[in-house]
């Protein structure tokens, strides 16, 4: 159990981007009856001062409280240098804030009372209070009805109301998003140092602090993540939308895919904000951890700050945008065109998703602009300017392990939901990220075992399928089989006179469709044994396409040509740096997790199981 979080704030004026937007409180102050809730993400103790002297006709009529409290209030006021309540003042606690305003009121001649309090819906704690002058409110007591007068036992003294408008809204806001709790941060950093020590210095972590020595960024990379990056670091996805932690800070799992097409982690980052300078620090620090070897391609959301940081830190990395996030904006940005033109959506989707080449896309885009008068559509013009980073006709020209979105990172975020919750502190967060790595390791070990020792189910028993079953991992062999099945509905026709003396051209089309609905794919076969198809599946995903398979079957090829086999999808795909190492670590006096121990035992007994299965059993004597 972590110690309860200590609220630590400072008595000073903060800028709006550091603490709160005071306009969000102003409406509530001016109109106390207006309900406005505040979430757990609120930051700091904010004061809103509105006509604090008020209209009181009798400012000398103050309420005399406990003498001790009065002395404490006076001392407190003195320590605050007799400041006047103003927007942005910060206090260590609600009691301290109330004491300050109560003392201030007494010093100028009025007493305060609590008009209303609001509580958090989740934890029941007080989220805000409204303080008003004791003479504020109605001008007099509410008249009693006849039956009410009968029930009244005795007359009570009533403080006269004067409609004094002196009131202040005090909002409790824990500074979780801006500052790590000092105790929790120290425990987390101690854990990171222990992990580094237990790994003989191979565990990497860096901490970024601000001018007040507060943690604002953290990057850590486990040795297993570094090993995975050496094997599969050609394609990386980077997503900062995950925020399930006590501090509501962006959490960035840097991810990719292994040879079983499973999610794999290349490192973690926890940051205070999403500014360009912050992203620049994260990328530089992470590159330091992976021996300054940037990925070939990185896929992110469309974020200007992140894009600028990537272009500066990784100038030679091919940066692509998540197509899903861009396409999810279509209904909002293009709603007018959808409503005005019944055929626009069909034409637009055909241009974006069905263009086989950049040339075909450019032609369709020009037709769209002319047909629907889009020259002055600002959003579409902006999307066209960055078309090479998200339109598939362009992005498929480069290897990206078949990925076009950051869904790998997002699915990893869902995966982390099993290990973290909203109250998870830094130390526990790091511990659980290590457990997630253990789970990842266990899945890869299990997939390695299934690939090596489990037989494949063959679809056709053809020589090429048998060859594929021996070279691909189990998952990638299933993907090959899908292409093999689809290839049977295609026909290959030679295009004489369309090639040159170094290559031949072939037309590949789907024979099961009507001629008018067929899409033509063109296959180029060079005399040096290289292949290129206009679908670009092999270039983008590293898996041989159905059109090439159909051609190879027509030529009665027995095996997949070596140039069409991508190393990272084969059984030996993780042999660049070797499989993920099993290194159970001690956290205190307890082994880190059961999954790490289990995975280590699985690997240790694999060889023994193979030897035992091949041994000849001894028969009992007759």
Image (tube, rainbow, N blue to C red):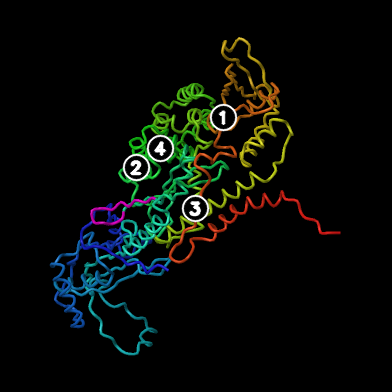
Mark 3: secondary structure: helix
Q: Residue furthest right?
A: 622
Where on the picture, by quarter, is residue 179?
A: bottom left
Distance of mark 4 from mark 2, alpha carbons?
10 Å
Distance of mark 4 from mark 1, alpha carbons?
23 Å
Q: Are marks 4 and 2 in contact (CB under 8 Å)?
A: no
Q: Is residue 443 magenta?
A: no
Q: Residue furthest bottom?
A: 153
Q: In the figure, 545 relative to 589: above or below?
A: above
Quarter holding the N terminus? bottom left
Q: Which residue is mark 3?
A: 437
Q: Is residue 513 visible?
A: no
Q: Position of residue 421 (x, y in %)?
A: 46, 60
Q: Which residue is mark 2?
A: 284
Q: Mark 4, residues whose alpha carbon is within 10 Å: few (<14), some, or many (≥20)?
A: many
The disc, 4 or 2, on the residue closer to the chain's N-terminal end is 2
């Amino acid at each position: 159990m972590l110690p309860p979080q200590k609220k630590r704030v400072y008595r000073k004026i903060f800028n709006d981007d550091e603490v709160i937007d005071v306009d969000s409180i102003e409406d509530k102050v001016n109109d106390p009856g207006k309900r406005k809730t505040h979430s757990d993400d609120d930051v700091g103790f904010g004061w809103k001062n509105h006509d604090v002297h008020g209209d009181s006709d009798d400012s000398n009529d103050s309420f005399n409280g406990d003498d001790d409290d009065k002395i404490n209030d006076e001392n407190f006021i003195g320590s605050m240098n007799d400041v006047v309540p103003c927007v942005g003042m910060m206090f260590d606690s609600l009691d301290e804030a109330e004491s300050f305003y109560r003392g201030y009121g007494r010093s100028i001649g009025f007493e305060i009372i609590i008009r209303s309090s609001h509580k958090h819906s989740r934890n029941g704690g007080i989220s805000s209070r409204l303080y008003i002058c004791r003479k504020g409110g109605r001008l007099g007591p509410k008249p009693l009805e006849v039956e009410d007068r009968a029930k009244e036992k005795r007359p009570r003294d009533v403080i006269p109301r004067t409609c004094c408008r002196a009131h202040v809204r005090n909002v409790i806001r824990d500074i979780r998003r801006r500052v790590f709790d000092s105790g929790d941060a120290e425990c987390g950093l101690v854990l990171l140092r222990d992990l580094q020590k237990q790994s003989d210095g191979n565990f990497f972590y860096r901490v970024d602090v601000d001018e007040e020595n507060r943690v604002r960024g953290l990057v850590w990379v486990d040795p297993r993540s570094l090993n995975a990056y050496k094997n599969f670091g050609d394609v990386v996805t980077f997503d900062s939308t995950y925020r399930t932690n006590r501090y509501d800070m962006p959490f960035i799992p840097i991810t990719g895919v292994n040879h079983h097409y499973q999610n794999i982690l290349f490192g973690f980052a926890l940051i205070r904000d999403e500014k360009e300078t912050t992203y620049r620090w994260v990328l530089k620090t992470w590159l330091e951890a992976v021996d300054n070897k940037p990925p070939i391609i990185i896929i992110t959301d469309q974020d200007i700050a992140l894009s600028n940081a990537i272009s500066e830190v990784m100038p030679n990395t091919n940066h692509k945008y998540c197509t899903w996030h861009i396409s999810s904006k279509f209904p909002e940005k293009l709603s007018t065109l959808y409503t005005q033109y019944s055929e626009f959506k069909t034409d637009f989707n055909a241009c974006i998703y069905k263009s086989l080449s950049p040339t075909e896309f450019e032609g369709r885009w020009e037709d769209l602009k002319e047909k629907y008068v889009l020259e002055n559509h600002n959003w579409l013009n902006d999307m066209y300017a960055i078309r090479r980073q998200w339109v598939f006709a362009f992005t498929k020209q480069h290897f990206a392990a078949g990925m076009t979105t950051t869904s790998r990172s997002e699915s990893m975020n869902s995966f982390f939901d099993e290990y973290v919750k909203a109250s998870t502190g830094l130390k526990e967060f790091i511990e659980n990220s290590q457990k997630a790595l253990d789970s990842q390791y266990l899945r890869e070990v299990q997939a390695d075992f299934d690939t090596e020792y489990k037989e494949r189910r063959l679809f056709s028993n053809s020589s090429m399928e048998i060859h594929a079953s021996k070279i691909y991992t189990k998952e990638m062999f299933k993907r090959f089989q899908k292409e093999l099945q689809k290839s049977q509905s295609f026909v290959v026709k030679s295009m004489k006179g369309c090639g040159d003396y170094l290559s031949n051209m072939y037309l590949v089309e789907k024979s099961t469709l009507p001629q008018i609905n067929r899409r033509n794919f063109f296959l180029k076969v060079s005399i040096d044994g290289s292949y290129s198809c206009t679908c670009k599946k092999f270039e983008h995903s590293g898996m041989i396409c159905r059109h090439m398979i159909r051609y190879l079957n027509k030529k009665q090829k027995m095996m997949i040509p070596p140039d069409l086999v991508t190393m990272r999808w084969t059984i030996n795909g993780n042999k660049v740096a070797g499989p993920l190492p099993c290194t159970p670590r001690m956290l205190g006096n307890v082994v880190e997790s059961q999954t790490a121990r289990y995975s280590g035992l699985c690997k240790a007994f694999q060889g023994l199981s193979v030897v035992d299965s091949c041994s000849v059993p001894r028969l009992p004597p007759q």
